[in-house]
Image: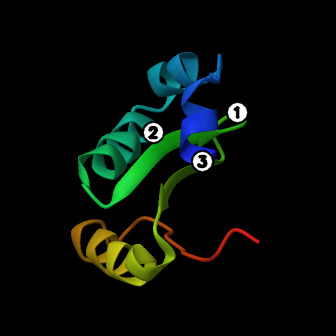
């Protein structure tokens, strides 16, 4: 339900932030490529990118992203 709501919203700063820091686009591409992630977006002005997934998949997604991108700061947790 949250992913559906957010899909109807936008972040006007995302495109300019990607121009300034292309790694943001890399992060979003990695999140969007993972079939377990229902929705990915940059938060605010670019301090964080996030992906929404079932809580049961979160640890595995985190582990796989850490393996693929050991220099990224990655954390998972519940939305509550």
- List the residue tagged with mark 3: 1
Q: Of the residues under marks 1 and 2, which one precedes in the sequence?
A: 2
- List the residue tagged with mark 1: 45
- Please give the label number shown on residue 55: none
As drawn, 50 above or below 4: below
Percent across and percent down for residue 80 are 77, 72
Percent across and percent down for residue 39 are 46, 45
Between 33 and 71, the residue placed more toward the observer is 33
**Going by the image, does 33 lie left or right of 45?**
left
- List the residue tagged with mark 2: 24
Between 19 and 66, the residue placed more toward the observer is 66
Q: Secondary structure at mark 1?
A: loop
Q: Secondary structure at mark 2?
A: helix
Between 5 and 44, the residue placed more toward the observer is 5
Percent across and percent down for residue 48 are 61, 50
Where is residue 60, by image quadrant? bottom left
| Residue occupying the point 29% across, 50% down | 30
| Residue occupying the point 30% across, 41% down | 29
């Amino acid at each position: 339900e949250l992913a559906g709501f957010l899909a109807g919203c936008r972040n006007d700063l995302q495109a300019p932030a990607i121009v300034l820091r292309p790694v943001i686009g890399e992060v979003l591409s990695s999140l969007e490529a993972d079939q377990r992630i229902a929705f990915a977006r940059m938060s605010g002005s670019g301090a964080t990118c996030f992906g929404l997934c079932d809580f049961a998949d979160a640890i595995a997604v985190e582990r796989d992203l850490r393996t693929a991108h050991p220099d990224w700061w990655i954390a998972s947790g519940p939305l509550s």
